[in-house]
Image: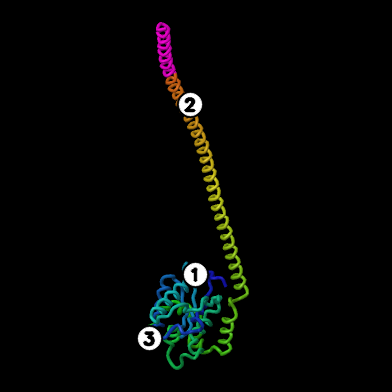
Amino acid sequence: MPRINIENALYFIISKGDRDEDIFREGSDYNMYLELLKKNKEQHKFKLFGYCLTPNQINLLIELSGDATISQIMHGLNSTYTKYFGSKYGRGGHLFQERYKMVLVEKEPNILGMSAYINLLPELLKIHQGPGAYRYSSAASYLYKGSGRRAQPINIESEVAETTGRLKDKTYEEFVSGLKAEDIAKIENELNKKPIIGTPEFIESVKAKVEGEKKKAEESARTGNMLRNKKFLAIGLTAVLALGVLVIYLYVRAIGIKENFKKEIERKDVELNNRLREEKEIIYKGLDEKYRADMVTLDALTKRLEAEKKRAKEGD
């Protein structure tokens, strides 16, 4: 059963200890869970038509009237109690079975029978015998009245009045005592085997609601997937555009680097040519000066030689 909210329906909740281990070891543990149940009832505004805490399980009969779902209510209750229990007894890991059992019950005409069953549970499970109500159930609120009645941990007087108001010609005590063993066995069998208890019309309306919720969930999932796909597409397009801009930037930068490199080569080439020309001019100038000096020296030597020849002839 999906955890959905159905109007005019009761939720019979059974939450057991992990591997059927005890979840309540002493009176203070029961009182702690009842205090948490009371606070959750006040916070989430649900109706509590019955409750029974036994050593290893919790039984609740709830009608939703606020915005909270059964899942939210049970998660808040059990997770908080698990922390309390673990801290008190030094116990780690799961305290409750991972998934509580939920039976959806058509309120009319089943509320009287379901409330009677949950109030009789301590006797049916043989954990309470004798006079007086079981301390950790709603039985006292229904069955035992008068000035001598013990104060109850959770105020469910309005729920009791709503339930007992359906009895016209008998008291609630008379109704419960008039239930036969087979009546109780039928209720127990239905709770054990059926996820929904009610008329065929009620069952069909619940199935239609479930299918509608499934379609909403599927549509929501499809919408979510479409939005995620659009988001991923937008991210992809942004990445492609960014990559394109980067490529263009690198291309332009590469062209700029190439042009700068070309200009640098040309500048270096001009600079080298100028330097070579200057070097040539210096060399040519040096050679020219040396040539002239050598010509002067040659001319002087030639004249000297001519003078020597002339003196030699005159001596002869």
The secondary structure type at the circle numbered 3 is loop
The secondary structure type at the circle numbered 1 is loop
Q: Is residue 90 above or below residue 301?
A: below
What kind of residue is marked 1? Thr
Task: Indicate left or right for 109 with 85 as reference.
Answer: right
What's the mark number on residue 69? 1
The secondary structure type at the circle numbered 2 is helix
Task: State the residue position of label 2.
Answer: 273
**Residue occupying the point 59% across, 65% down:** 214
Which numbered disc flags the more N-terminal residue, 3 or 2? Answer: 3
> Could you say which quadrant of the image residue 314 lies in?
top left
Residue range (magenta): 288-316
Task: State the residue position of label 3.
Answer: 150
Q: CA distance from mark 1 to mark 3?
A: 32 Å
**Residue occupying the point 37% across, 88% down:** 148
Residue 137, x across and y down, in percent = 44, 84
What kind of residue is marked 2? Asn
**Residue occupying the point 48% across, 88% down:** 122
- Circle 1 residues within 10 Å: few <14, some 14–19, many ≥20: some
> Could you say which quadrant of the image residue 146 lies in?
bottom left
